[in-house]
Amino acid sequence: MYDRRHNMMSKKGLQLNLVCIIFLAAIIAVLYLNSGQIFAAVKSPSPKGVEPFEQNKRLGRGVNIIGYDPLWRSRSKARIQSEHFKLIKEAGFSNVRINLHPFQYGNADENNKLSETWFQTLDWAIEQALSNNLMVILDFHEFNAMARDPLGKKARFLAIWKQIAERYKDYPDEVIFEILNEPNRELTPELWNGFLVEALAVIREKNPLRTVIIGPANWNNINYLEKLEIPENDRRIIVTIHYYSPMEFTHQGAGWTSYKDKVGVQWNGTSEEQQAIIRDFDKAQAWAKKHNRPISLGEFGAYDKADMPSRARYTSFVVRQAEKMGWSWAYWQFDSDFIVYDIPNKKWVEPIRDALIPPG
Ligand code: BGC
């Protein structure tokens, strides 16, 4: 009796052990596969193509970075460091929009060839973002030069896109290309519709599956969405808009604008102030629904000269409205001006950070 029972027990024990071993093996296999995916995303990537609405959801909350960082002149002068990417992730952001100025500081030679140094700096920034699980938007930020002389700069613009598209063609889906920040002035809506088709064709040669961001003319203005013509059959596209309305509030005291001389403008979140934003966003949303395109709010914010309580109120209202609409977003910007992080003093500008990503 005892023996039989004992036998039965050891059989049961054996079965139990087997179940445990299979269970553990399954866990190890899942962990291994996942680590492979994470690893693959950074080290041996290749784009598989993600549906653009899904991609927009993954972009989520972001911040513009390094457009005006001296690191492009010399890596030793960089303000941004590895630790900042980690901080950005830990604060709750999920994307960084890297503002690129390839026309400047001799980054591209007279034959439009980009320097290896420039690329290595960009490689580094992308690597930092990906290894912190941040999605990356490569934003061609030469909007001023393109707006002054679009036809004169067109060959340079396309030649540079060709090189960027080649360099990053095997990078994972987490890397997204944005054709041009804020086309404006001489780069009219009509011209822009032609430019974007040509740039998209250059990108698609080597990046058929990559998500590409395109925005309307007149500084990515919501009211110009109606004039934007994107190839109907290319569905791997997210449409971007920028929002700085009312300008007399967001750009008060900003030296590069006509609002430079008037400060002290508040944003109190009155119903009238809120309705103005809601109306604009509803207009963008109606366009997005009609054309079945996801929207990303690629820039917004209020300049440092406005009072902080107004800036925080405004930022919070804009960003929550964007999220209600299901848009992804990227705040302007991490460092330099409109800052959400104070690099020299190693601290977040808390009212802005909390407005963007509410604590808790
Ligand atoms: C420009 C910045 C400017 C910001 C707000 C950006 O697109 O690159 O220079 O500060 O818009 O005006």
Image: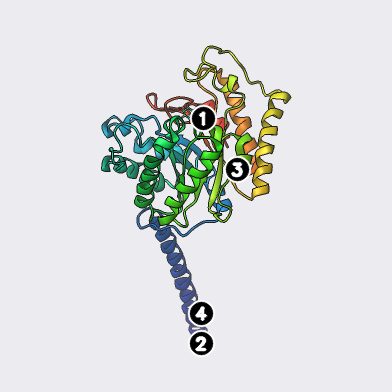
Above or below: residue 236 compared with residue 325: below
Pick the front one: 158 or 286: 158
Q: CA distance from mark 4 to mark 2?
A: 12 Å
Can you tell me whether the CB of the residue at mark 4 lies under 8 Å from the nearest atom of ligand 1?
no
Residue at numbered disc 1: 185
Residue 107: give x, y in percent of width and height.
30, 36
The front one of 212 and 128 is 212
Work out whether mark 4 precedes mark 3 in sequence or the reverse, and give the earlier one.
4
Q: Secondary structure at mark 4?
A: helix
**Among numbered discs 2 and 1, the one appearing first in the sequence:** 2
Question: Secondary structure under badge 1?
Answer: loop
What number is the disc on residue 12? 4
Residue 96 at x, y = what percent? 46, 40
Dividing the picture into quarters, in which one does residue 351 lie? top right
Residue that carries the numbered disc 2 in the rendered image: 4
Q: Residues within 10 Å of mark 4 (few under 14, many from 20)?
A: few
Which amino acid does the dot numbered 4 rest on? Lys
Q: Which residue is mark 3?
A: 327
Give the foreground label among 2 and 1.
1
Q: Is mark 1 within 8 Å of ligand 1?
A: no
Closer mark to the observer between disc 3 and disc 1: 1
Q: Position of residue 183 (x, y in %)?
A: 50, 35
Q: Nearer the viewer, mark 4 or mark 1?
A: 1
Query: How many angstroms separate mark 2 from mark 1 (CA)?
Result: 91 Å
Q: How packed is label 3: few (under 14 Cα within 10 Å), some, or many (20 or more)?
A: many
Separation of disc 2 and disc 3 at Cα? 67 Å
Mark positioned earlier in the residue sequence (2 or 3): 2
Name the residue at 69% across, 24% down.
Answer: 273
Using the image, determine if residue 24 lies above or below residue 307: below
